[in-house]
Each structure stands twice: as C-alpha cells, then as structure tokens.
Amino acid sequence: MISVVVYGRNDSYGYNLAKRAAISINCIAEVLDHKDDEIIFVDCNTPNDIPTFPESIADTLTPRAKNRLRVLRLRPEQYERGKNGARFKVLEPLCRNVAIRRSNPANRWILNTNTDMVFTPLEDGISLSTIVSELPDGFYELPRFEMPESLWESINRLDPAGTIDAFKRWGLRFHLDAVITASKELLFDGPGDFQLCLRSQLFQIHGMNEQMVLGWHVDSNLCKRMWLLNGQTRTVLDRLHAFHCDHTRIQTVYHVAGKSTENSLADFFVNVKTPYVPDQASGWGMPEEQVEEIRLDERYMTRIRTTLERILPGMERPITGCSTVDSFDAGLYYDNFHVFPYLADIVVNFAPGSTIGYFGCNVQLLSMLADLRQQLGHHGHINYCADMLHPSEPLIRCNPASANEIYRESGVFIIDVSMKHLPSRLNGMGLTIPDKCPEVVQSARTMSEIIIELARCEKDAADNNRLLRPAMFVGCHSTIFDDIIKNLFSCAMTPANTYVRNGFISPDAFTSPPPIFPLHLYAIGAAVEDIVSWITTQLEKPVAADQVRMAMSLYRMFLEAEEKRRALDALETLLSFDAGRGMLEMQMEIARINGVPEQGEALRRFIEEYEKRPYNNTNCTGNAVQ
C-alpha cells in the first residue's frame, strides 16, 4: 500500500538523534498494517568502516519496525558518483530518489518524511495504511506540529502505541496543535515532513530534483511540480496529525539562524513551469548502481559473533606474559587469535564487493581474514603483495599482486607489520622482539617504504579531491612503525591491547619531511649493552659501559649545544677516547642504515677537517655545528 521514505547518516545529526529516530521509526511502523508496507531508510555516505545508522540503533527498534525496515546503504564511493557536486555529506533528493527507484512496485503510495516525525490518526484503531487506501489520487500535505524536546525525551522509545496516544493528547492539552498555512502549492509551512505522492506520478515526473545540491526548498520544489501535475494540493488533516520532534537545541549546518545555505527559491519554486526534470529522465536515483540492502533480522545482527565462533578456537584462560614495561617492538609478535576480533570489527562493515589490499607476511591472519569475508557473504577479493607473502596453498578469494596494483585497485588497506616470520630474541623482560640481523632490517625498510608510498598515494587523492581510502595498521603499537604512521595518518588512539589502528591520510601529511625511519634499531639495537657490543666489535677492543654512556651524553651535547664552543668541546672530548670515537663511527653507520648516508658522510668530513687544524675554539660564537 505505502512505502515510507526516510534518509540519514551515522553522524549524530542534531540533538539526541538516536532517540528521536527510534521514536519516529517505531511509531511509523506502528501505523502500518498492509502486507506490502515498508519503511525505506537510505543510509547516505556513512564511512565504510562503521555500521549504518539503523544498525547502530537496532536494539531500540521494535520487532515490528525491524520487520518493515529496509536499509539501503549508499556507500561513500557511490555518493561521490551521484552527488552532482554537492558540498554536503548527504544530498536529500538523491537519497529519496534512490529509495523511490527501489521501492515496492506493488505499493500505490510513497510518503516522503523524516526520522523525527510521529503520525497520530485521529480515529482510534485506524492505521495510516487504511487512511491512504481510501484516498483518491493526488498529492497530499499535512501541517507540522512541533513537539518540545523535553516532552519527546520523556517518553519510552519502545512504546510506540503509548507515544502516539501521548502526542495526540499533548497536542491539545498543551496547546501545541497550531496550523501554519502557506501558498496554494504548499498549503502548510514546512511541507517536507509529510508529502504523500502516487508512486506512478513520482516516476512520471523523474523523481526529486537532483540539481538541488544545497539545503532547503527540496520539499517546496516537489509541491510546485505536483501542483502543476495535479492542479491542486490536498490534505488529510481531518484524519491524521503530524508531530515533529524538535531538535534545534543544537545548531546544525541547516539550522543556523540567518546563515543556512539554501537552494534558490526563485529557480526551484517561483519560476518552475513544468513538473518534469527531463535532464535526469533516465538517471534519477542512480538506477544502474548496485545498492546494498540490509535487513535488521537476527541473522544479520548476529553475523559477526556467529562468524567469530566458527573461526576462533577459544581459550581456557586469559592471555598472560604481556607488559608495558620494556615492551618496545613486542607488539610485532601479537597473538593472531587475540588480534583477529579487533580487525574483524572493522572489516565487517566494508562493502561486500570491496577489494582489500594486504601488505604483510602473516599467512594465518590473512587466511582467517579471507575466511571471515566468505562467511559474511562478501564477494570482494583480497590482493596481497606477492613480493612479501608466499602462501603454501591458495587462499579464498586472495590474489597475489604487485604493490602498484594494490595501491591502484584497493578500496581499503591492511598494513600488517608483524615480524613473526623473522629471527627473534628475548629482551630483558623476556618478551619476544626482532633479532638484530639483515633480514629484519630489510623487512622493516620494505614496510616503511610501503607505508610512505601509501601515504603519498592518499595525499595525491586528497589534493585532487578524490575519495580517501581507509587504512588499518596491525601490530604497530609501541614499535618503530608507530611514529611514522601517526605522522602520516589520522588514526584513532586505540588501546594498545587491540594491536590495531585505523584511519585516513592526515591533512598535515608531508607538510614537512617524514621522520627518518630508525632501521638501525634492528641492526645495532638501542640498549647500552647493544651499543657496547657494536663499538667493541668495530674497534676490536673492549669498551666499558660507563664509557659508552659518557660518549652518548657527549654526542648529544655536540648536536644540541646552543654555543658552538661547547659543541666543539664535546667533539674534542669524543675524539680523545675509544668509546667516543666508536660513538662517532656508529653515528655514521646509523645514517647509512637509515637511508640518509649523506648525513654520515657530512659528519665524517667535518671530523676530518676539524682534525686538520689545531684545537682552538676560544673565539667561536654562534650556533652549534649540526
């Protein structure tokens, strides 16, 4: 009989969105009783890594509402294709057209409304479905009665029948029912909250006008076009009232008094001469786009925990042996089963057909991820970097690809910095960390280059106003990778024990050079005993730890002293004992390992020039030598 069309985004638009939307959807469902009736919610441009708005409030919707509700998810990449240059994150006419195009063809009526409306039939026991079934063809409007925020907040969102009765009673008892009339085309002020149209006529006039890419007057435009088509605008005020749950306590982009950006009233109302929009006759509502449909049934809402039950073996006692003390790089040896639920928590919301690009060497985690997607019903592929990973057997919908192919073709990225496939050692706390060896250095260098190149690709997308793609980083907490990731990407500060960060390219990425990646930590180490070992090997003679500590302090003074004289004093002292000379040699080697050999060569030349002249810096002034 009727398809009710609403739209929104999971973004907390306006005051107490979750409650007023639940109130509205539950109450609308309460007055629908025809077998073909439906509520279509177009979830527009919600970020790919979070659920739709109706999913986020599903536990506050009645079984009747969930049974009637169809959620059409218009993904960000789809919105980019259909938004017609709109600057806002949601475009009303596009959303409504997406729903109208995909509405039940068995239904005679389409009701355009919003998720803050409650409809109260004046006759007890009569449904909205019954009311519209008795109406002659035409276009119908209702005045909007405002329900104060403190009143609608006081009701139980899971009691739609009680809410409808309360609103109907309060309207008269609290002097809220006030009809504000408007022009003959609109009939009433604020016409967009109840616009009852024949489905056939909406198709006839090419839907809502998608050229209206700013705020306001979308409803007035439809009124004018329907008035031109039918010759009049009708009302059902004698049978039904419409209450709006007011939410202007908090300003929104559309509700700043005197500052709202709006479509031209002259262009889209006053000067409209035809009901039709021929420029969009074949393309309105994105008819060729495959739009996901979500039903909030038990199977869908429990899909993630059901899938995790199937994949994970379970454990009998909590994981132990982790620590925040001396734990640098221990996250590179995360537990696959522990990390997987946190990764799945993000992946579950991605489009079923999306391509995931995987950089890493963890075959088991990749296999679990592929299994997850298959059991969720996803049909998109995972492209893994063929230069990094060589599975012993094929994985479900996983394809080897070059790094460039992954950058180019993926809609989302997983950067897995795990080093469990490489030589390891135990640190002072008994935690597993990477060994000091060439294989670890090369692996870290490769991964750092991948992170930087991905950031460059996404920075280019940002600079050219292309859609940004999300990236997930696994195992990076408290590692050498974390600093460069947080420098280039805007990531949530997720808890350390999740081992997963996710985010998008930072607006500030590459405004200054990325930090030098400290690969030397995997060749030399960072502890005093590591440095003692390196210098002892390099000089072929033992050096004491206290001498190394003094050399470390002197080298910092050489770099950081504000007075040139003090810097040269530090250098002179470094050159005077074995640990000091070893420290300088080590800094040159560090520069080479970290990919900035020119810095090491500059230090070598400076020392050579310095040693050619007698030590005399008594007249030196200015900044320290860098």
Image (cartoon, helix red, strand yellow):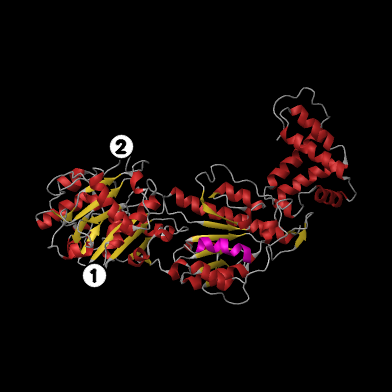
Q: Amino acid at mark 1?
A: Pro
In what element is the residue under mark 1? loop
Rendered view: 221 above or below 374:
above
Q: Quadrant of residue 183?
A: top left
Compute the Cα span from label 2 to label 1.
Answer: 40 Å
Q: Amino acid at mark 2?
A: Ala
**Residue at 67% over, 47% down:** 596
Rendered view: 3 above or below 311:
above
**Residue at 41% over, 54% down:** 10
Q: Which residues are magenta?
A: 337-347
**Residue at 75% over, 58% down:** 431
In what element is the residue under mark 2? loop
Residue bearing mark 1: 105
Q: Is residue 558 visible?
A: yes
Q: Quadrant of residue 311?
A: bottom right
Q: Horizontal placement of 250 versus 265: left or right?
A: right
On the image, the x and y values in percent for residue 588 come to: 75, 46
126 and 584: which is toward the camera: 126
Q: Quadrant of residue 546?
A: top right
338 part of magenta stretch: yes
Residue bearing mark 2: 257
35 part of magenta stretch: no
